[in-house]
Amino acid sequence: AKHCLQHLREEKPEGVENEAVEQLAFADRILLNKVDLVESEEALQEVESEIRKINRLAPIVRTSHSNVDLSQIIGIKGFSLDRVLEADAEFLSDEQDHQHDSTVTSVGLECAGECDLERLNTWVARLLKERGTDIFRTKGVLAVKGCEQRFVFQGIHMIFGGQPQGDWKEGEERRNRLVFIGRNLDRAELESGFRATLC
């Protein structure tokens, strides 16, 4: 906690990642350690405010000497797009290009329809091969043709995985919701690429 702002605000040479910013952008839970070394509550609030500029949704857990209740970090099923949308219904809206630092943004996409699995796999493979170093994180829920369950996925750079998770409710519109966090993201390119996977 004491040196967090220094690392988050550190200027890096062109093309070099700010690892502290990248790790916060990925986080589903943030442990803010050594809070006992920070001189005041106001200083801690400034740190947390800076963290919120990078990641608005992950819970921040204050710790000293790395002491943390394990129930806060183990078995938490960290990523839940429904939970994210419950906390911020506008997270995936077209107007939401969230700024993390001056070079890192997120793009949220939402559309109805079902994905063709083969086209989806081809698009994801090509996207991550060509842009994987710039795409820090992907996550979302997809409606896949022929699958009665939501397909929940996450990816970090070129590592991508997902699984069916929870049935679509009867009468529920099958909507695809995706979030990309990274550098130099092109909303139009991402949206047109994804829409091309729809049946």
Image: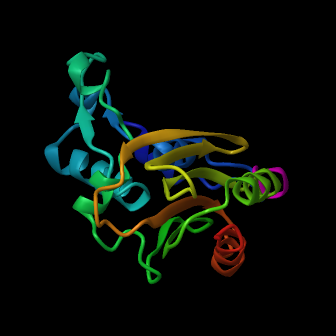
Tell me which residue sits at (37%, 53%) in the image. 81
* Residue stretch in magenta: 129-133
> Is there any visible trace of residue 120 in the rendered image?
yes
Quarter of the image that includes the N terminus: top left
Near-viewer residue (137 or 54): 137
Q: Where is residue 124 in the image (x, y as percent from the top left)?
A: 73, 54
Q: In this view, does 12 lie above or below 104?
A: above
Near-viewer residue (124 or 62): 124
Tell me which residue sits at (61%, 62%) in the image. 115
Q: Main secondary structure of the magenta part?
A: helix
Q: Position of residue 183 (x, y in %)?
A: 67, 62
Tell me which residue sits at (31%, 18%) in the image. 66
Residue extending furthest toward the left = 41
Q: Does the magenta stretch include residue 101?
A: no
| Residue 188 in the figure: left or right of residue 102 | right
Near-viewer residue (93 or 38): 93
| Residue 186 in the figure: left or right of residue 170 | right
Quarter of the image that includes the C terminus: bottom right
Q: Position of residue 111 (x, y in %)?
A: 49, 75
Q: Position of residue 187 (x, y in %)?
A: 63, 77
Q: Is residue 63 above or below residue 128?
A: above
> Is there any visible trace of residue 1 in the rendered image?
no
